[in-house]
Image: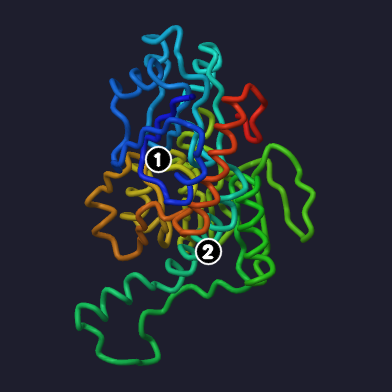
Amino acid sequence: MKKVLISRVLPDEVYRALEGLEVVRRDETAPLSSDDMRAALREYDGVMCTLGDQFSAAVFDDVPAPRCKVLANFGVGFNHIDVAAAKAAGVTVTNTPGAVTDATADVAMTLMLMSARRAGEGERMVRAGEWEGWHPTQMLGLHLTGKAVGIVGMGRIGQAIAQRCHFGFGMSVHYFSRSEKALTFEAQRHGDLKAMAAQVDVLVTAVPGSAETRHIIHADILGAMQSHARLINIARGDVVSQAALIDALERGVIGGAGLDVYEFEPDVPDALRAMDNVVLLPHLGTSTGEVRVDMGLMMVANLQAALRGDTPPNPV
């Protein structure tokens, strides 16, 4: 019987789908330690891992002939796994695309609306008992309908965000992508990110985390944005230079930001937490019961296929 480690607590439906395997549950919410990961590669046929489980090249170097044949990742992003090192060690890596698309796009829209309409700031005011009643100039925000959105990365999630912006809010869609996309609605592709940033009212990151996308949003990009514009990050924390963002917000270079991810997550700097024009969410991108079950079942399907020696549905 194949032996499998589950690195984090998962929905009950996922455990029930693992019949026929010897399953070791690690019922914790913290990531695997480096020693845990080395032991997992030595002692298990497969590992169901997720964000924070840093399977680096150094981890694989210490286990040159792993028993483990598959790292089935829970999530679409896999920048916490050195895929090249895994493949060199004979370990297949999989992920869960598709299942996360709509939920992540919904959170992008949540952040856009919360930032534009100052919803977080307003709720804090009401909860603190500081609201003095309605008046015509109370908490004036940015009217999102009809504005221009710029999407950095136009994969599944980027396109889902663009659809919501175009059809739901009548926004003009601009995007920065390596290639032209065949879309069912009008959108303008840009080859120059800085030039696009200067034209839009909301800039949304939707790129995967990687060495190529690290700090793709830096001081020059933020400096090109309009003073009322919002930056929304639902991708990976390090696609935005956190220091440059804090500086831009403090100096009023941009109008605000909505963040679901952070460069040194779960650490959130005091400077960000102190700003009323920043909406901060605790990485809620895929946090719905239905989506997490779908992700888990997709992960199980990948794991089982790899353990049978078949090509999994979602290799990376």
- Which amino acid, mark 1? Ser
Q: What residue is rendered at 38% in x and 18% in y? A: 43
Classify 10 Å Cα crowding around label 2: few (below 14), some (14-19), many (20 and above): some
Q: Secondary structure at mark 2?
A: helix
Q: Is residue 35 left or right of residue 293?
A: left
Residue 100 at least partly seen: yes
Residue 219 at least partly seen: no
Q: Is residue 287 above or below residue 28?
A: below
Q: Which residue is mark 2?
A: 109
- Which amino acid, mark 2? Met
**At which x and y percent is residue 298?**
57, 43
Q: Is residue 82 left or right of residue 24?
A: right
Q: What residue is rendered at 39% in x and 15% in y? A: 42
Q: How many marks?
A: 2
Q: Which residue is mark 1?
A: 241
Figure quadrant of residue 287: bottom left
Q: Which numbered disc flags the more N-terminal residue, 2 or 1?
A: 2
**At which x and y percent is residue 307?**
57, 25
Q: What residue is rendered at 55% in x and 45% in y? A: 297
Disc 2 versus disc 1: nearer the observer? 2
Q: Is residue 207 left or right of residue 255?
A: right
Q: Secondary structure at mark 1?
A: loop
